[in-house]
Structure formats: structure tokens, C-alpha cells
Amino acid sequence: MDQIIQTITVYFLPVIFAITLHEAAHGYVARHFGDPTAHLAGRISLNPLRHIDPVGTILVPLVVVALSMAAGQPPWMFGWAKPVPVNFANLRQPKQDMLWVALAGPAMNFLMVFAWALFLKILAVTNATEPFLIRVALAGIAVNISFMLLNLLPIPPLDGGRVAVSLLPPRLAWQYAKLERFGFLILIVLLQLRVINVVLAPFFSAMYRLIRFTFALN
């Protein structure tokens, strides 16, 4: 139990920022392309409290971590924030601009991977040996890589699904978009069958190698 509590403490801030800043990025890019909905709702903010869903941002990720560790597995993450409201009809070119709005969230996670890696490098350069801070930095890298890759899966309503809808021809895009109502069920089934783990593992490893090379980390 102590180990589970320690792990939850380490992952808490990385998870909060990974999910909430991901959502804020969607709103910011939507405003850039003509939709002020998220801005008017006060959702383009770096304040995590504006994006936290008590269940999806806090309860579900912490329960998933605890259950995975209790089962003797490495901790893994799954969760969500309050979706940033985007009215795609307000975008100047809805189908094309949807691509950039969708990619904004994973792009934010990508930037946070490098931010946490830089923090880890600063700890190493300054010879800071506080184990808790090192674990938080490592968790920040892992969480953001996981969220980025997971959201890029081409399953509506994940960001990758919206990217696919944006790129497909109109008739096929309309048919593909109808999968959205089954999207989370499909995702949960694939997670339980560990199909997603197998598919994303090579990309996860490649990202880790890139980070280690870029920042000369051991």
C-alpha cells in the first residue's frame, strides 16, 4: 500500500498538467482558426483547475495506477479532462482546420516531454539527488509520451480520429466520424486486450531514445 501511495504522489502533478494543458492547447488553436468558444468559456488557461474533471482527471488515473500496481504490473495511465468546447462550424475552413485543432493536444504533450526532460537534465547537472524530484521528472516524461501516443490513435473521438476525419475524402470522412459513439468502448477493449500496448511500444521506445540522445541522459 505504501508503494502505491508513493507512486500516486509521484504521478499526480505530471498527470494533472499532461491532461489539462493538452485540452487548453485545443482551445488556443481553435481560437487561432476562428472559433472563440473555448476562449469565451474561460477554458484557454494554464490553470489546471479550469480543466479538471474530478472523475477523469483525478479518480480514474489514480485508480488505474493503483490497480495496475496491485496486479504486479508497471503503472500505466488513462484519464481525461473536461473537453474544451470547440464549434468546428466556426472554424474558417472546418475540415482543414480540424486537423490543426486536433494535433494541438498531442503537440502540447510532446513539448511537455521535453520540458520534463530538461528538468531532469537540470537535476543531473546540479547534482540534485532528491529521489522524489527525479521520479516526478521521469513520470512526467512517461505520462506525456503515453498521452501523446494514445491520443494519436486513429479512433474517434481521440485526436488521431479527428485527424483521420480531416484527411479523408468527405463521404468517407462522414462514415468514419460515425464511429465516434463507439470510440471509447473500442479503446477500452483494445487496452484490456493489450493490443494498444503492443502497437505503441515501439513508438514509446523510440521517443525515449530521442529524449536520452537529445539531453544526454543515462
Image (cartoon, rainbow, N blue to C red):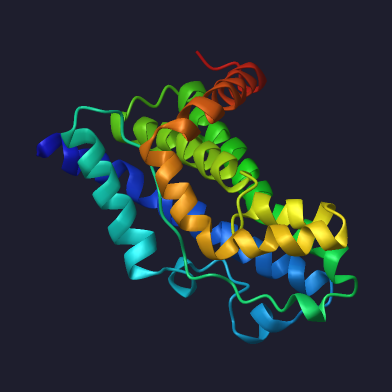
**Residue appearing at x 78%, y 59% in the figure:** 173
The N terminus, quarter of image: top left
- Residue 110 in picture, x, y percent from top left: 64, 41
**Residue appearing at x 18%, y 39% in the figure:** 4
| Whether residue 31 is situated above or below residue 101 in the rendered picture | below
Q: Quadrant of residue 83?
A: bottom right
- Residue 134 in picture, x, y percent from top left: 38, 30
**Residue appearing at x 57%, y 38% in the figure:** 113
**Residue appearing at x 18%, y 32% in the figure:** 71
- Residue 90 in picture, x, y percent from top left: 81, 81
The furthest residue to the bottom: 40
- Residue 23 in picture, x, y percent from top left: 58, 63
| Whether residue 117 is situated above or below residue 36 in the rendered picture | above
The answer to whether residue 121 shows anywhere in this view is: no
Q: Is 182 situated left or right of 74 in this image?
A: right
Identify which residue, 137 or 68, lies in the foreground. 68
The furthest residue to the left: 1
| Whether residue 155 is situated above or below residue 4 in the rendered picture | below
Q: Quadrant of residue 133?
A: top left
Q: Is 147 situated left or right of 40 in this image?
A: left
Identify which residue, 211 or 66, lies in the foreground. 66
